[in-house]
């Protein structure tokens, strides 16, 4: 913090103590002086991500981006509440030049660390005080590169015609000052100004765009609070399609204009099914949690899809690429399932990532049953038999995989298998009751693995500790669940060896798709 005035700190502390003694009628033990907020949220996977000492309610972001120069000008207005007597506090911000910071309208000083913007307000912020921080900043936003491969895996990624901010967990701090941990959800208003020939997409619903001179402005608003990694922007040339599902849910789809021909038609046919997919998922998980849906398909050199709140982003290669199995509708099913599991019910700790990825993968299995009549149990059996006792799938503790394995295939596959093992143990009725209660009771909130286990035990009336231990917390292959014939077979016409061959072929395709997908996640 360098040149910061020590005299002023003491004055603030003295004034605070005086005020505290006046409030308590004097004579009481002197209140402890305000202290700095911490530089991390206390998540052992990512110690510097998020912060402590305050809680954000709302981000109001004004972003001007010029795809030609790559320059971003930002104004972030952050409404927060102090959770202790705060002398200073941290925001996460990577790169950029900070031009000014105010707290409650008064100029503040600041210092920078590689991952942090440390704000020194003119006056301390008492516990429970609600305050507004305004940060003006500019610069060329950077991608987040995997420290081992140097490959861009998140943050702000340049595209041939603009840029896109997506990543998990690293993204938000690469484009705005933020309390960058999913445990601090907030609402977002994102106002994007770009040269008028470009589109600017983000979460939620937008007001009609306004044009001034060569620039166009679009304001996007998210009704419900979101985790910071689920806020996104995508800027470029897009064909935007606004429509409603049969249930009346507004959908905004944007496909990069450079995607043409049969690839474009395959993408459009998957996106046209979003209404059916949301209806199916609503029948399994309860009402769709948000006010809007849709998709952004961008041309960017990374192989992922991400479940941005209300509007996931996808790369076009999910719909066809010589070196990659086509995922087609499956990946849309997966990202839409995250709207319940991951977005509405968010993580409080990154170690619980299977609550996101295992659940979204299980939704793919339910969709497979609906579309192809292969049951989740058959998919489970296939993968259980395929992965012999020495397979890497069993060496990952899915309930605490560590940051290096956070998006390992095991988190997806063994995570989904955990849910099928639970379903076998409690029966289908209680199983879906558990999923729906989880989504309902924790809507727009958070959940942890112990809380999920407690809910499953409460609803089923069964003791499930050893089941979850075996599936989530061991590094050995769990025993095969005892399945009844009713659970094994779905409503399909094929029987016997013909059916087995069909299942094997379909499963090989699905497993190859998953493998290809998660290899992109390798950090
Ligand atoms: N959550 C993403 C999914 O749907 C996967 C993912 C993990 C990801 N890390 C990422 C996507 C980084 C984009 C960037 O499975
Ligand atoms: Zn996922």
Image (cartoon, rainbow, N blue to C red):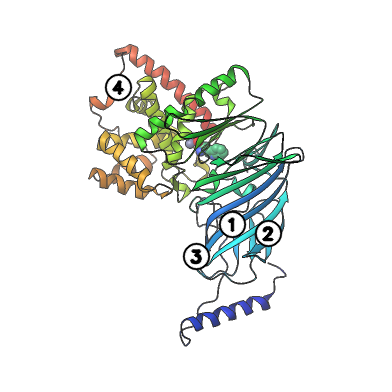
| 3 vs 2, front mark | 3
Q: Earlier in the sequence, mark 1 or mark 2?
A: 1
Q: Is residue 4 left or right of residue 357?
A: right
Distance Cα–Cα, label 4 vs label 1:
51 Å
Per the rendering, the mark at residue 83 is 3
Q: Which mark is residue 45?
A: none
| Lower position in the chain sequence, tag 3 or tag 4 | 3
Is 163 placed above or below 79 here? above
| Mark toward the viewer: 4 or 1 | 1
SS at mark 2 in the image: strand
Which residue is pictured at 25% across the width and 29% down the height?
Answer: 483
Quadrant of the image containing the N terminus? bottom right
Q: Give the x, y percent position of residue 413.
A: 42, 33
Does the CB distance between marks 3 and 4 fall below 8 Å? Answer: no
- Precedes in sequence: disc 4 or disc 1: 1
Residue behind mark 2: 112
Q: Is residue 454 visible?
A: yes
Mark 1 vs mark 2, CA separation in Å = 18 Å
Q: CA distance from mark 3 to mark 4?
A: 52 Å
10 Å neighbourhood of mark 4: few (<14), some, or many (≥20)? some
User: Would you name the residue on which mark 4 appears?
Assistant: 490
Residue 78: mark in rendering: 1
Dots 4, 2 in contact, CB < 8 A: no
Closer to viewer: mark 3 or mark 4? 3
Mark 1 element type: strand
What residue sits 72% from the left and 36% below the top?
196
What secondary structure is found at the residue carrying circle 4? loop
- Tell me if 372 is positioned left or right of 215 in this view: left
């Amino acid at each position: 913090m360098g040149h910061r005035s020590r005299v002023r700190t003491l004055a603030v502390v003295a004034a605070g103590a005086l005020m505290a003694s006046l409030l308590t009628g004097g004579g009481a033990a002197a209140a402890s002086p305000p202290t700095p907020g911490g530089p991390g949220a206390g998540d052992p996977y990512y110690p510097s991500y998020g912060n402590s000492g305050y809680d954000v309610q709302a981000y109001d972001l004004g972003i001007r981006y010029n795809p030609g120069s790559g320059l971003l000008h930002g104004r972030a207005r952050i409404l927060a509440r102090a959770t202790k007597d705060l002398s200073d506090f941290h925001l996460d911000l990577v790169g950029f030049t900070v031009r000014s910071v105010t707290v409650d309208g008064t100029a503040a000083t600041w210092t920078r660390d590689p991952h942090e913007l440390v704000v020194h307000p003119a006056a301390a912020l008492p516990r429970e005080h609600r305050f507004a921080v305004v940060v003006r900043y500019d610069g060329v936003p950077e991608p987040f590169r995997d420290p081992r491969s140097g490959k861009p895996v998140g943050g702000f990624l340049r595209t041939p015609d603009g840029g896109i901010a997506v990543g998990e967990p690293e993204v938000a701090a690469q484009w705005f000052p933020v309390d960058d941990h999913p445990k601090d959800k907030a609402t977002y208003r994102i106002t994007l100004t770009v040269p008028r020939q470009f589109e600017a997409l983000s979460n939620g619903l937008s007001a009609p765009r306004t044009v001034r001179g060569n620039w166009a402005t679009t304001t996007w608003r998210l009704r419900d609070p979101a985790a910071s990694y689920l806020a996104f922007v995508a800027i470029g040339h897009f064909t935007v399609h606004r429509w409603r599902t049969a249930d009346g849910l507004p959908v905004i789809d944007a496909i990069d204009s450079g995607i043409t021909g049969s690839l474009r038609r395959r993408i459009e046919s998957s996106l046209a099914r979003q209404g059916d997919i949301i209806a199916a998922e609503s029948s399994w998980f309860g009402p769709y949690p948000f006010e809007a849906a849709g998709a952004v398909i961008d041309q960017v050199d990374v192989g992922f899809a991400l479940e941005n709140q209300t509007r996931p982003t996808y790369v076009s290669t999910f719909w066809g690429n010589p070196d990659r199995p086509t995922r087609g509708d499956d990946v849309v099913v997966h990202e839409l399932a995250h709207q319940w599991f991951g977005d509405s019910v968010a993580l409080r700790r990154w170690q619980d990532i299977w609550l996101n990825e295992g659940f979204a993968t299980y939704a793919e299995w339910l969709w497979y049953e609906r579309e192809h009549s292969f049951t989740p149990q058959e998919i489970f059996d296939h993968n259980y038999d395929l992965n012999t006792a020495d397979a890497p799938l069993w060496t990952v503790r899915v309930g605490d995989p560590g940051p290096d394995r956070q998006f390992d295939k095991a988190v997806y596959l063994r995570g989904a298998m955990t849910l099928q093992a639970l379903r076998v143990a409690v029966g289908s009725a209680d199983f879906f009751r558990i999923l729906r209660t989880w989504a309902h009771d924790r809507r727009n909130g958070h959940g942890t693995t112990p809380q999920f286990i407690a809910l499953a035990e409460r609803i089923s009336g069964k003791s499930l500790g050893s089941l979850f231990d075996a599936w989530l917390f061991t590094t050995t292959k769990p025993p095969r669940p005892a399945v009844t014939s009713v659970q094994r077979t779905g409503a399909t016409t094929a029987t016997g060896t013909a059916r087995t061959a069909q299942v094997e072929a379909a499963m090989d395709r699905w497993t190859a798709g998953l493998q290809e997908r998660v290899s992109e996640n390798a950090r």
